[in-house]
Image: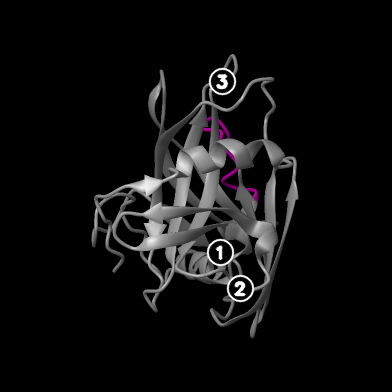
């Protein structure tokens, strides 16, 4: 299980995201620099214990209405080969030292564990507490069983999110990582699978919505 350290990270994740978010295709431009607040999320464990995996929600309050961004992140103790384009930044961790922080949709470890979550083979963990499952995170997959043995992945950004194609020994799967979360959206019958979780809005309190959907029927 991943250990959550109560320590410092310099610069902070939100500081790194404030400069990274405006460069993304799915960013909702407000005409101002992002003003971010951490608003929820969850973690998955890397079976090898080498890579930190977090699905973070950061709410931008710089515009007229708050916008909730879903940002999967991975934390590594060395650069990921061939992934310079996915690097969000580096930071100094008070316990672990320098960490390389990546857009997790381009990190094969996160994608593999996300697939395991959809197939019921990985358990979501609390975002800020060590060794604590988070039962509020719900996942399902109603398509044909796909082998969890990932052979390759690819990702492409668009205005609605990041589409990740996962190639496995048992076939391929199209996963959309929703980037701008919408608690009012109801598409439960439109996809083969999903991950649903909760987060907080500045004025409306706790809400829930789709973080990930799998393929169209």
Q: Is residue 140 magenta?
A: no
Report which residue position mark 1 lands on. Answer: 142
Q: Which residue occupies 69% across, 20% down?
A: 31
Q: Which of 23 and 46 is in front in this view?
A: 23
Query: Would you say the residues marked 2 and 3 are in contact, meaning their CB atoms lie under 8 Å apart?
Result: no
Q: Is residue 180 visible?
A: no
Q: Which of 53 and 184 is in front in this view?
A: 53
Residue 80, compared with residue 192, is above or below; it is below
Asked where in the image residue 103 lies, by quadrant, the reply is bottom right
Residue 98, compared with residue 202, is above or below; it is below
What is the secondary structure assignment of the residue under circle 2? loop
What is the secondary structure assignment of the residue under circle 1? loop
Q: Which region shows up in magenta? A: 180-190
Classed neighbour count for the residue bearing mark 1: other residues with Cα under 10 Å, few (<14), some (14–19), many (≥20): few
Q: Earlier in the sequence, mark 3 or mark 1?
A: 3
What is the secondary structure assignment of the residue under circle 3? loop
| 2 vs 3, front mark | 3
Q: Earlier in the sequence, mark 2 or mark 3?
A: 3
Percent position of residue 161, x then y: 67, 46
Asked where in the image residue 215 lies, by quadrant, the reply is bottom right
Report which residue position mark 3 lands on. Answer: 62
- By what rule are the colours in the image chosen? one colour
Question: What label sits on residue 144 in the rendered view?
Answer: 2
Classed neighbour count for the residue bearing mark 3: other residues with Cα under 10 Å, few (<14), some (14–19), many (≥20): some
């Amino acid at each position: 299980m991943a250990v959550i350290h109560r320590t410092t990270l310099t610069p902070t994740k939100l500081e790194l995201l404030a400069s990274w978010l405006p460069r993304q295709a799915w960013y909702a431009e407000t005409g101002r620099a992002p003003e971010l607040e951490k608003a929820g999320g969850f973690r998955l464990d890397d079976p090898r214990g080498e890579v930190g995996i977090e699905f973070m929600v950061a709410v931008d309050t710089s515009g007229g209405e708050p916008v909730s961004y879903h940002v999967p992140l991975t934390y590594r103790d060395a650069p990921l080969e061939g992934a310079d384009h996915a690097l969000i930044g580096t930071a100094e961790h008070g316990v672990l030292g320098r960490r390389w922080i990546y857009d997790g949709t381009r990190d094969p470890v996160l994608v593999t564990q996300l697939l395991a979550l959809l197939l019921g083979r990985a358990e979501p963990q609390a975002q800020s507490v060590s060794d604590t499952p988070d039962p509020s995170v719900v996942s399902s997959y109603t398509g044909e069983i796909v082998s969890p043995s990932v052979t390759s992945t690819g990702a492409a950004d668009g205005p609605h999110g990041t589409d990740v194609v996962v190639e496995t020994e048992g076939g391929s799967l199209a996963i959309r990582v929703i980037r701008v979360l919408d608690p009012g959206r109801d598409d439960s019958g439109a996809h083969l699978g999903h991950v649903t979780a909760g987060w907080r809005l500045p004025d409306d309190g706790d809400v829930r919505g789709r973080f990930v959907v799998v393929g169209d029927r």
